[in-house]
Amino acid sequence: MSGLLALLDDVAAIAKVAAASVDDIAAAAAKAGAKAAGVVIDDAAVTPKYVHGFSAERELPIIWHIAQGSLKNKLLILLPALLALDHFLPQAITPLLMLGGAYLCFEGAEKVVHAFAPHADAEVDKDFDTKDPAHLEEEKVAGAIKTDFILSAEIMTIALATIESPSFWMQAITLAVVGAFITFIVYGAVALIVKMDDVGLHLAATGRTSGGRALGRGLVLAMPKLMAFLSTVGTAAMLWVGGNIVLHGLEVTHLWAWPYDTIHHIAEIAASAIGTASGFVTWVVTAALDGVFGLVLGVLLIPVATRVIGPLWSAVTGKAKAAH
C-alpha cells in the first residue's frame, strides 16, 4: 500500500510540473504572438486577394489549401530550421530576417507601383481569360504559399527571439503553438471575410425581417470597400513591417545604426511636442517613418529583382520570367 501511495504522489508531482509547463508555454506563446502582431495583420490583409476572381464555391477550398501550406511552412520547414539555426548558428538569424524584411518591402512597393499602372489589372484579367481555371488556381495557391512562407518566417523568427527559455523543448512547443494558433486565426478570419458577401446575399434574399434584409444588402455593398481597405492595409503593413525589420537589423548588427536611431529620435520629439498619449504618438510616427523607409527600399529593389534576380533565377530553374 505504501508503494502505491508513493507512486500516486510521484504522479501528482509530475502532473503539477506538466501543468506549470503548459502555463509557461501558453504565456510564452501569447507574448510571442503579440510581438508578431504586425506581420499577422499583414498576413490576414494580403491573403484575400488570392481568391479574387474565383467562383464562390472555390473560395473556401482555396483558403484551406493555403492554410495547409502555411502550416507546413511553419511546422515542417521553419520550426526545425530556426531551432537548428538558433542552436548552431544564431548569428545568421538576423541577416535572414533582414532578407525577409527586404522581400516584404519589395512586395509592398511593387503593389504601390502597380496601383498606378492600369495594365496590372489587365494582366490579371488576361490570366483568367487564357488559363485553365484549375491550373490558374494551382498557380494562385502556390503564389500565396510562397508569400506566406516569408510572412511565416518573420512571425516564427520574431516569436523565437521573444521566447525566454533555456529548454529546447519549451522553445519547440511554444513555436509550434504560436505557428498553429496564428494560422488558425489568420485563415479563419480570411474565410469569414471572403464569405461575408455570400452571407449578405443570403440575408438579403431570405431575411425574415426588413432589418435583416437591410443588413444583408449592407454587407453586400460594404464588401468591395472592405476588400479595398484590406488591400491598402496589407500593403502598408508590408512596408511598415519590412522597413522596421531591416532598420532594426542594421542597428543591431552595427552596419548602419543612423536611420533607426534618427527615426526613434524624431518619434520622441513628436511625442514630447504633443504631450498626450506619448506612447501612441511614438508608435504612429515610428511606424510611418518605417513605412516610408520600406517604400524607398522596395522601389530601389524593384529593378534589382526584375532585371537581375529574376533573370538569374529563370536561367537557373529554366522557367520563363513571370511578366509584371
Image (cartoon, rainbow, N blue to C red):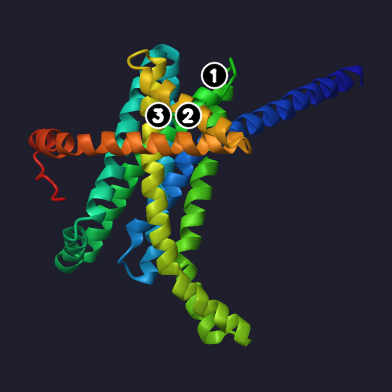
Residue 310, placed above or below residue 269: below
Question: Residue at 27% of width from left, 59% of height from top?
Answer: 137
User: In the displayed image of the protein, which residue is found farthest to the right?
Assistant: 1
If the image is split into quadrants, where does the N terminus sit? top right
Question: Residue at 68% of width from left, 31% of height from top?
Answer: 22
Question: Residue at 62% of width from left, 35% of height from top?
Answer: 275
Q: Is residue 32 visible in this depiction of the protein?
A: no
Tag 1 residue: 168
Q: CA distance from mark 1 to mark 3?
A: 25 Å
Element marked by disc 2 = helix
Residue 167 position, x and y percent, is 58, 17
Residue 228, placed above or below residue 155: below
Q: CA distance from mark 3 to mark 2?
A: 10 Å
Tag 2 residue: 158
Q: Which amino acid type is marked by label 2?
A: Ile
Q: Please rate how many residues cluster around mark 2, counting C-alpha atoms within 10 Å: few if below 14, some from 14 to 19, many from 20.
A: many
Mark toward the start of the polypeptide (3 vs 2):
2
Q: Which amino acid type is marked by label 3?
A: Ile
Q: Which amino acid type is marked by label 1?
A: Phe
Tag 3 residue: 245
Element marked by disc 1 = helix
